[in-house]
Image: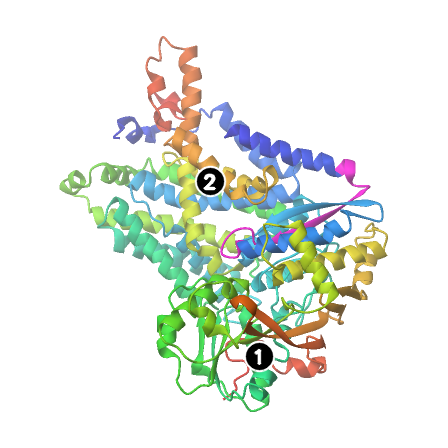
Amino acid sequence: MVDTRQLFSGNSSFSDIHPGKLLVIVFLISYPGFTSDFFTFQVGAYSLILGTIALSLMMLAGYGGMVSLAQMTAAGLAGYIMAIFGENTVGVMGLGWPWWLTVITAILSAAIFSAIVGAISVRTEGIYTIMITLAISVAFFYFVRQNYQIFNGFTGFAGVKPPTLFGIYWRDPVPFYYLTLIISSTFLWAVFHCSCSTFGLGLQAIRDNPRRMRALGYHVGWHRVMAYFLSGVIAGSAGVLLVWFNGRISPGSIGVDIVIDILVIAVVGGLRNPIGPFLGAIVFVLLENFAIDLIDRERFNTVIGIVFLLVVFFSPDGLLGLWDRISSKILSKRSARDENGRAQWEDPVSSGSLKTLK
Amino acid sequence: MRILIKRTLATALFILVANLVMAQGTIKMGSLATLEGAFTVLGEDSMRGVKMALNEFNYSVAGKKIQLITGSSDASPDSAIRATRKLVEQDGVQLLVGPLSGSEGLAIKDYAKTKPNVTFVNGTSAAQDTTLRNPADNFFRFSTDGAQWMAGLGEYAYKEKGYRSVAVLAEDYSFPYTQVFGFLEPFCRLGGKSAIDARFWVPIGNKDYSSVIAALPDDVDAIYVALGGADSVNFLTQYEQAGGELPLIGGSITVDQSVLGSKGKTRKFVIGTPAAGPISDTWKDSRWDKFVADYKKQFPDGFPSPSLFAHGYYINTKAALLGLLLVGGDLSDGGKKYRQALSSLTFDTPTGMVSLDERRNAIADIYLTEVFEGTGGNLMNKTIKVIPQVSQTFGMEYNKFLNYGQVGRENPRCD
């Protein structure tokens, strides 16, 4: 799976922005203009939030080869801290810190939590990483469900609100959408660039051959823990947005099914490229909301399951892989002579958005 | 996949267009129940209740068609809010029946406050504070709450059964808190005891009760068990296998058909268990008999007898429809007139008269039952007594009742 071209994709610049990309950017910015509040808030903003959490998983799994199921837990911890240190209407905790301090505390705690998870699981590989991180997230779920003094048990917290700044209440659909759009695109850009930095390249090299990297003098463990820390920053920020979005947080928000949902989103979207998790999240949110209208209400979860199964079945690389396969087929037909064999590549980095680099 | 997205969008678009076309002659009613997760079976039965009420009206009121749009949650407040938001903000329902579970109800009540032009009618969620403290002006509950369901049980356990001290085993969320409060308050007022450390709170879906069973004290007269569905079956089986001998007192959904219909020794063991709730399977009354017969006829694949959930959703849907009838299906003023009509609505149900108090919570009859062995060895809930017209404050003054404090694990203290 070593793809040398991926390693040197760091030379990419945004000077030659693909017209398709431009179209997407324009679409995203003008999106609230032509949709209802529901589509702006519950489909748009929610997809971006879930996509950001899945992005933190993609970063670990795609670049670091570490599939961590504790990303949703890190996001949930940030959400809980917002409720505990900030304000809530339940009457438990709610220390009333100013919002900016709470946000910083929440994101930092999520990052540190994620780093600790990383430190615990750093020596494991593959399925064992999954098991350890799953165990941590399940333990956290049961802990918050049974702790009443701090986490208010089963009921959790309600009435967690974003601040009113510059005369704008940030939970109104349109401001909230732009808030999530800015934060998620910042992280998307950051992950994109991080993957091309020395750190990101080191991480990918560790994924491909840790022993060689160790021989080269890299501290593999710390490198990985650092990756966990950074992904915790992303997950924690998304967690803050999530608790603002829902206005509440309870053990149900971080249960095993949600943890798995994040994995599903990342896998269905595609783990090779940071844009994948967002695609997965859009499909997930649309299905979650509208599958019940497409089919008998007793069967709609089956539809969701089958769609995901089909995606993974036909394209192990998720939606991105599917897209690349289609687009590269069209391309290779168009310029079959000078682009021999392109259709065989399924890697988005080599055949997809970054193809202009060559 | 893209085809599916397109289809989804196309469906959404179609619904939007359809809205505009049909807006005049159609009333949109949403219905929210747990059609996924641990309470799926209960959620399905509650939808039967909604359909029964709609069938009674042939899906039309005052010449307007009722369009039913279903939403599903998994009993968590988050998912209930998401589904409700979709129904209200996307599908544009003008009235919503639901949700099913206690903590969902608390969340929907908070959401209702942000949508003053939509009318929310409860499903079967029975947490006390949904209507008792900070109620929403547009949230109506024609079904009673979990404490009301316990009416008469505390007295019965103390006076008739002669129990003086009980242990408590219940699930750890708002609905069982409400039930435990409803049972213990009169029981303790009469002089009964229930120590704080003899109360056991388990998570929903708990499978292993061995640690609870081992910790149950010996010096109590009975165990009050407020568990639901599979949890209840699991506990009873394990308690019986562990050689437990203490008599039981049941919550409203503890000794239901799934327990009574089970095979094995557990059956013998539950005979004589008193319980209370908004329905009684064996109530001899023509209205109830007709309800059961209709249920069986319309849903041959349903339960042998309508559950508390079908009943609760039926009552609430019917109330919503009767209210529409009173205003001639006119919701053009954002439902203001409609909600006034609902507030003063009194109607006859399969389980007696129902009316609302000033916080829009139902006043209704409650049934005290006891498990007995019928002819042919069938276990049944025999109706011991009907407690007429139980109000949320049990006839007390509102402010005085608030002094009891919020329901919770240690309310009442009772030691």
Q: What range of the chain is rendered magenta?
A: B20-40
From the top left corner, tell me how far across and down residue B256 is, in percent.
55, 66
- Residue plotted at (42% across, 42% down): A264
Instruction: Give neighbour class at mark 1: few <14, some 14-19, many 20+ (Cα, 10 Å).
Output: many
Judging by the rendered image, the residue that carries numbered circle 2 is A305
* Picture colour scheme: rainbow
Q: Can the viewer see residue B114 in this picture?
A: no
From the top left corner, tell me how far across and down residue A258 is, in percent.
45, 51
Q: CA distance from mark 2 to mark 1?
A: 43 Å
**Quadrant for the N terminus of chain A in the image:** top left
In the image, B402 versus B56, the foreground residue is: B56
Instruction: Give neighbour class at mark 2: few <14, some 14-19, many 20+ (Cα, 10 Å).
Output: few
**Quadrant for the C terminus of chain A in the image:** top left
In the image, B64 versus B119, the foreground residue is: B64
In the rendered view, does A241 fall on the left or right side of A118?
A: right
Q: Is residue A167 above or below residue A344?
A: below
- Please name the amino acid that badge 1 sits on: Phe
Q: State the SS at label 2.
A: helix
Of all residues, the one furthest to the top in this rendering is A337
- Residue plotted at (58% across, 46% down): A42
Q: Can the viewer see residue A122 in this picture?
A: yes
- Residue plotted at (72% across, 81% down): B395
Q: Circle 1 marks a residue in which chain? A: B
Q: Is residue A35 above or below residue B264?
A: above
In the rendered view, does B37 fall on the left or right side of B294?
A: left
Q: Circle 2 marks a residue in which chain? A: A
In the image, B46 versus A8, the foreground residue is: B46
Q: Which mark is residue B183?
A: 1
In the rendered view, does A115 fall on the left or right side of A103?
A: left
| Magenta segment includes B23 | yes
- Total number of numbered discs in the rendering: 2
Q: Quadrant of residue A52?
A: top left
